[in-house]
Amino acid sequence: MADIVQENDLFKSIFESAVEGILVVDPNGILLSANPAAELIFDYEPGELINQKLEILIPENLIENHLSQRDNSTKNQIPRPKELNLDLFGLKKNGSKFPVKVSLRPTIIEGKQITNVFVSDASELKTFEQELKSKDAKDRALLEAIPDMIVIQNYAGDIIDIHKPEQIYVPEHIGFQLPKEELIGKNISELVPPEMSKKILKAHDEAIKTNEIQIREYSLEGTNGIIYFEARTARLNNHNLLTIIRDITERKRVIQELKESEAKTSAIINALPDTIIIHDTEGNFLEIQESELISSLFDREKVIGKNLKDIYPIELSTKIINVLKKAHETQSLQVIEAPMPGKDRIVYCEGRVIPFEDNKLIAVIRDITQTKAVRDVLYVRNRALEAAGNGIVIADATLPDNPIMYVNDAFSQITGYGISEVLGKNCRFLQNGDRDQKAIQIIRTALKEGQPCNVELRNYRKDGALFWNELTITPLYNDQGSLTHFIGVQSDVTERKKAEILKDRIQKTLEMIAQHWPLDFIGDTIVETVEQHIEDCLASILFLDQEKQTLHNLSAPNVPN
């Protein structure tokens, strides 16, 4: 058989030069011949395969199937094309498996049956097929994951293919609600309203003419309001267009809310008396809001891009830069007050610095010149009130029962009550139940009518000791004429009052003597006067009986017997 094969010169030439491996096998599976390409594929030396069993080139787990296939092919003389996808493997001389493509051509030469086996190494092809399958799987997974509708149309607008995710909402009256198989072949004009169809076809024309992606937005009335879509159309080839359709309703809503929020923020910023400046941590002016305050300080356009050190004295600029850096380092609000040299005057400013982004900081600047002036005046007045020798009380006339909202130190010294003990109370607690005084009714009438008054009344210290209080009450009205506060100025006139009482008592005693009142009445009056005028005192008056040379009590009402 081998001689028959070798005698054919034409066959030999083709056999030797073929790039595809060729094996000639007899019905018993004996290799009669192998061309160089076959020997190279299986890593055998020239002539080494002759008279070997074909099974040495087949992995062991495939031999049984091979024998069955060979018997069937030999018996029926059926050729097997290489195109059959049989996942066949060969076995190299070193025992390694590799994928092969095999075709069988049974034939008869001079009455002898042989089979020509054509073999090619399919390793690269197999790798390519696997990569192709993997890519196809990835593409399908990606396509399924895309939430957008993808439509392929021809230039006339007829749908060729469509990917329509379930999550994309299409209003009920729009044709895209149809199943995919019913959409194929339909024209876009059959699926959407006429006005929308015109816009879509116009975008198609632009994509065809310019070969550029066309981006359009469309809106449709849905059950729950307007649905917005964005369509991106591009030429796919010389016949078709690819359009990606995305639901942008939520994006539209967010953008609208953002615009409204920005408008609101802008309105608030414009309405505020503050000015916003953006600095970096080195003190450079990055952005400056236009405002009346900025105009009074410097020329905005000339300052943007400059450093604080270029604008202000070194001491002031260093102070501000240190605050900027502290706000950045601590990521917290920092507040600074400083006099800023303006174009024609010193402007006292308050700056609130907060971290913004990266190395940027927002400084909210406010003109506090007037506020500081008022604050300074109030400070001086408060110091004066604190230094005053008179007790000063301020009561809130807008609240029920006129509660105390301020007392100075002199009030505490006079009454013995601490400041925290009296705030929120009405001043009547100083009367300690001693209400039967004409001065109290005068005070009530003045408070009721919002009028000033001046009285002297008995008050009591925290330890219960009586003192005479000369009280002047002045009502305070605001610019609208409404009563807001009562200011009370009190003086401890106890000593003066005692002197007046003593003087009155002495005068009364002299009148009793002149009118020849009984001696015991006169004595009691003198004792009462002495005891009231001198603290912790018990007095008595004795008279001498000159005839008997004895002493007798004239008046001693409080002295124990």
Image: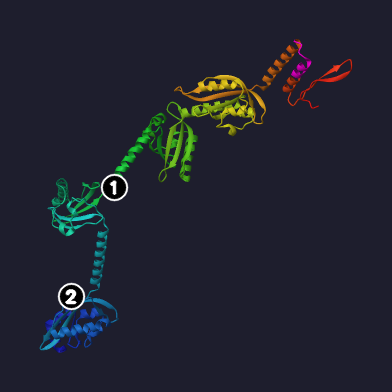
Location of residue 82 in the rendering, given as x and y in whole percent from the top left corner: 17, 76
Q: Which residue is mark 2?
A: 84
In the displayed structure, would residue 337 be above or below residue 202? above
In the displayed structure, would residue 268 be above or below residue 111? above
The residue type indicated by label 2 comes to: Leu
* Camera-nearest residue between 448 and 367: 448
Q: Is residue 244 visible?
A: yes
Upstream in the sequence, badge 2 or badge 1? 2
Q: Which mark is residue 251?
A: 1
Q: Main secondary structure of the magenta part?
A: helix
Q: What residue is shown at x 25% (from left), y 80% (from top)? A: 42
Residue sitting farthest toward the front: 518
Location of residue 213 in the rendering, given as x and y in whole percent from the top left corner: 20, 50
Q: Which of the image's four quarters has the N terminus?
A: bottom left
* Camera-nearest residue between 359 and 423: 423
Left or right, 415 with reference to 235 = right
Q: Is residue 423 magenta?
A: no
Q: Which mark is residue 552?
A: none
The residue type indicated by label 1 comes to: Arg
Q: What residue is shown at x 21% (from left), y 80% (from top)? A: 38
Quarter where residue 304 is shown: top left
Quarter where residue 440 is shown: top right
Q: What residue is shown at x 57% (from left), y 26% (from top)? A: 393
In the displayed structure, would residue 559 be above or below residue 25? above
Q: Which residues are magenta?
A: 515-526
Helix, strand or loop status at disc 2? loop
